[in-house]
Amino acid sequence: MEKVRHLSKATRSNLITYGLVTAAFIIMDLLIETGSASYSLMGLLVPICAYICLATSLNLVVGVSGELSLGHAGFMSIGAFTGIVVVQLLGSGTNDVVRMLIGLASAAATASVAGILIGWPVMRLQGDYLAIVTLAFGEIIKNLLNNFWLGVDKYGLHFSMKSAMALGLTDGGRVLINGPQGASGIPHLSSFFAGYLLIMFTLFVVLNLINSRSGRAIMAVRDNRIAAQSVGINVTKYRLMAFVIAAALAGMAGALYAMNYSSVMPKKFDFNTSILILVLVVLGGMGNIRGGVISAAVLTILPERLRFIGDFRMLIYALVLIGAMNLTYDTRLVEWRRKIREKFSAKRQGQDERGGVSGE
Amino acid sequence: MGFLTNLINGISLGSVYAIIALGYTMVYGIAKMLNFAHGDVIMVGAYICYCSMSYLGLSPLLSILLSVAGCTVLGILIEHFAYKPLRNAPSLSVLITAIGVSYLLQNTALIIMKSDPKVFPSVVEDLPSVELFGGELRIQAITIVTVLTCIFVMLGLTYFTSRTKLGKAMRACSEDKGAAQLMGINVDMTISMVFAIGSGLAAIAGVLLCSAYPTLMPTTGAMPGIKAFTAAVLGGIGSIPGAALGGVLLGIIEIFAKAYIGTELADAIVFAVLIVVLLIKPSGLLGHTTTEKV
Amino acid sequence: MDLTRMSRRGFLQLAGTLGVSTLLGGCGSMERRPYTGPTDPQKVNGVFRIGGIAPLTGPAAIYGTANRDGALVAVKEVNDSGRLKLELNFQDDEHDPEKAVNAYNNLKDWGLKALVGTTTTGPCVAVTDETNADGVFQVTPSASSIDVIGGVEGSNEPAKHNVFQICFTDPNQGTASASYIAEQKLADKVAVIYNNADAYSTGIFNNFQAKAEELGLNIVSESTFTDDSANDFTVQLNAAKSEGADLIFLPVYYTPASIILQQADAMGYQPKFFGVDGMDGILSLEGFDKSVAEGVMLLTPFVATAHDERTQRFVQAYKELTGSQELPSQFAADGYDCVMAIVQAIEVSGVTPEMPAPEICERLSETFIQPDFVVKGLTGDARWLETGEVDKSPKGMIIKNGVYEAM
């Protein structure tokens, strides 16, 4: 009996999250169709979708699995460049939807391979050491992509670690990835609808994982690794599982992001972008999937809305970060909020409080 | 001769990393937080020194002192307003705050000093460089000064933490804050002092960094900050000789990778070395291994 | 993974919400909304709204702010003279394609009719794609890659007839430099240091290399750097020195160039240095010791210390605007020329500010490619090819006693 109510609460919470995203999608769509959305807002829709997916996927690592990852943008870039190459190789002859799907699938595939390659050694470390190693991997991926040239001509694919000239392309060949200058001529396959579908897919995977047996094992490892180990949970397996799934989802988000612009550079996927995604997760509340979704949308729009104050806008952004953290954890404020909550919950005594992570 | 020149350049760069890493490691050892704003304190230190030399016309030595004083105060202020309220918060929240402080410093510098790079005047203009092997090998004065400063700072910090009262208090806080408090140590004050020392070191590092690589922008501190953080972890974060060793090694690896493998792949190689070291010795080269209790 | 038990219910949740959304949402958001900008004469009030995009914060800000300030000087000059009424709105792109497209969308909400920008190549390619789809006329002051204009051999992008460049195309400068060095017999052994993260730098280097091979110039060392590693060149200089290079070709911007010159000086290595137009600005860097730049040769279209009346007037106005004594760099002059070229084309074509943006774009583009359309700019007399490339020639300069002299 207890178990049924337990699950149904999670289901309800998940439904609220799905419903929230869908409602936002429908409202935006209506705004666009009636012509009342600004160009600026319309232009932000796809990046917002991508950041929501990234925040949700990183939440799986940071919030659910409890590992600090500072290299999430690395997986995003692997997915982005895989997606770009695949859709360009398929050519414009293929149906756009099919192209996009194959692009996303291959992005997920390469990003998860990278996730396994990186996660396997990384999962032997813990805490801040794990954080620095993910940072290092992020930088390595960026650095390697900066030295990666890929071209295609009638003889097939060519790659080089030296320069575009070294590809030795024949006439009519084209450079797909041009070292630090990245890719250009990317077909615009991303759309708001595609972004919405990808968010739903990402939420579906993450929320289901959280509420599954594996998810509970992952959270058990987060809460107390040694205790989890002692009851027979394979710690490395579950940590790696969260890490790789998050990598695959980040790769797909990267592909969605890249196919919204005609040019993408490896420089974009640097430490700062990893941090940006982390900020989305932390401000939304670690482990709180819905919070991450909301903070991703708000923090992508905020700097754009602050454009009118020019150079001061990043200053405001910085102050928002510091302020949000201080307001959340200042001991006096925490005390004050606790009192309020006590008063509030006294009225609803008898209702059980459930801890842990859900879609709320 | 090319090899020796590269080695000297590596040691020079490594010594700058080492000084920054020492600041990182002090703060991490005691406050147990990754202070990502440390790199930007370097930049502020360099700007203060630049301004007092170029606009106020002060002597290099006075400018450095001013810059150290300025950064020390800045460090205490940052700690007081941004980090102190978060003493009991999860480490990730402190990390985000540190990133916020980093953005704040960079963008304030951008607004005040504008984006155009300043060419940093060398603080050791008057000292001659040393020429060996009939001029084949030339060691710049700044290189010698940087290396000597690094050694001096490392020895000084080691003495400070092991012999002085405040230093011992810091070590006590690092071991166990609660117990330290019970022993009558003012933990808040001790942490403030750590930030003061770390930021003062950052100012020195900033001046030396910009004297050797003479360009100063609001983003100047970011990359050296990350590298120095890597160096601190490489040497074993929390360990003073470890930070110095990690810094120098990192500098040498970076320059050698640039010279003998390729300029473009240098960063990848630096970070790859870090990963390999951590996989073999998860607590860094000179770090302590701690056993986890249930 | 244990998704099996949850998947049926999870799937139902997902399918339910997706179904609702597709029913309600439809596919209305798929199509691009056409852009005209304000066309109501009352609202437009005879003012041409010109948008600008450049990196105003971040590491590339120095080039972006120069572009902006140059453009502002031009707008003020035009408004004061009463030729046209202009309004300029500059937005920051942080040297990031995403932010550049955001900035452009912001300008669309504001109602731009022509665009000056963007400064750097990567963001510019992303923006040109948008302006091309909307039909907004665009002139870029300094994004020199062929992908910006598209449709040229070797470019990944389709031809964009609404986009024009003010800066040199990269091939021009590389070949000119190689020919000059070979003809004047300036060096036996040449070293090159270039930024391989930068389309401008790589583009010039590739053409330099091809021409050098043809002319039998001996390139003994080629080394690269990226924006992340642009503060230390000791390794690259050591490589050049140990190969015995007596001339270093620097197809780079002036900030890294200033460090290269200083570090070479500190090393006691004194080869000849040869730069390109991006090197201009080096003499006005704050705190730069001009003596280390003595004897540096460069090809540049703009010289802030030139004595002609137009340059002097520009320099004066620029100093007044920025409130500092620093001389404008070539980037500022490019920004100025962008606005002036647009103004001249507006006057020639006779477009009015209340026309829809695509119509303005079409007429301005036609005007730009007329063979007799010549803009006498600060950076030389410019004509445009049908592709959008500029046709003008650089001047050879040498730095003597801290000022430029013609070579």
Image (cartoon, coloured by chain):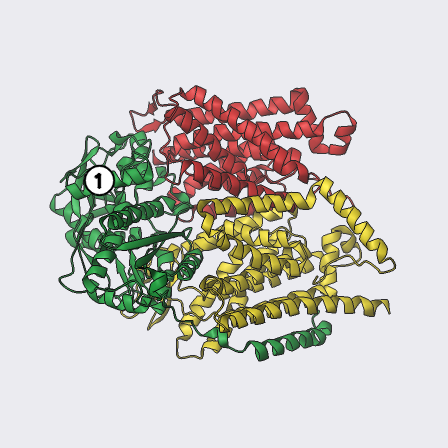
Chain colours: A yellow, B red, C green
Can residue A239 be seen in this snapshot?
yes
Left or right of residue B164: residue C241: left
A121 or B183: nearer the viewer: B183
In the rendered structure, the answer to whether residue A86 lies left or right of residue C276 reads right
Residue at horizontal 57 percent and vertical 48 percent from the top? A133
Q: Position of residue A37 (x, y in %)?
A: 49, 66
Rendering quarter of residue C164 = bottom left
Measured as percent of width and height from the top left, residue C104 is found at 40, 59
Quadrant of the frame with the C terminus of chain C? top left
Amino acid, disc 1: Ala
In this rendered view, identify the residue nearer to me: C240 or C121. C121
> Is residue B294 positioned above or below C4 on the image?
above
Q: Which element carries disc 1, helix, strand or loop?
A: loop
Residue identifier under label 1: C304
Q: Chain of mark 1?
A: C
Q: Is residue C206 above or below residue B113?
A: below
Count of marks overlaid on the render: 1
Q: Position of residue B63 (x, y in %)?
A: 44, 23
Query: Residue shown at 52%/29% (left/top)?
Result: B71
Quarter of the picture containing the N terminus of chain C is bottom right
Q: Would residue C281 appear left or right of C11 to someone viewing this image?
A: left
Specify the quadrant of the image occupied by residue B278.
top right
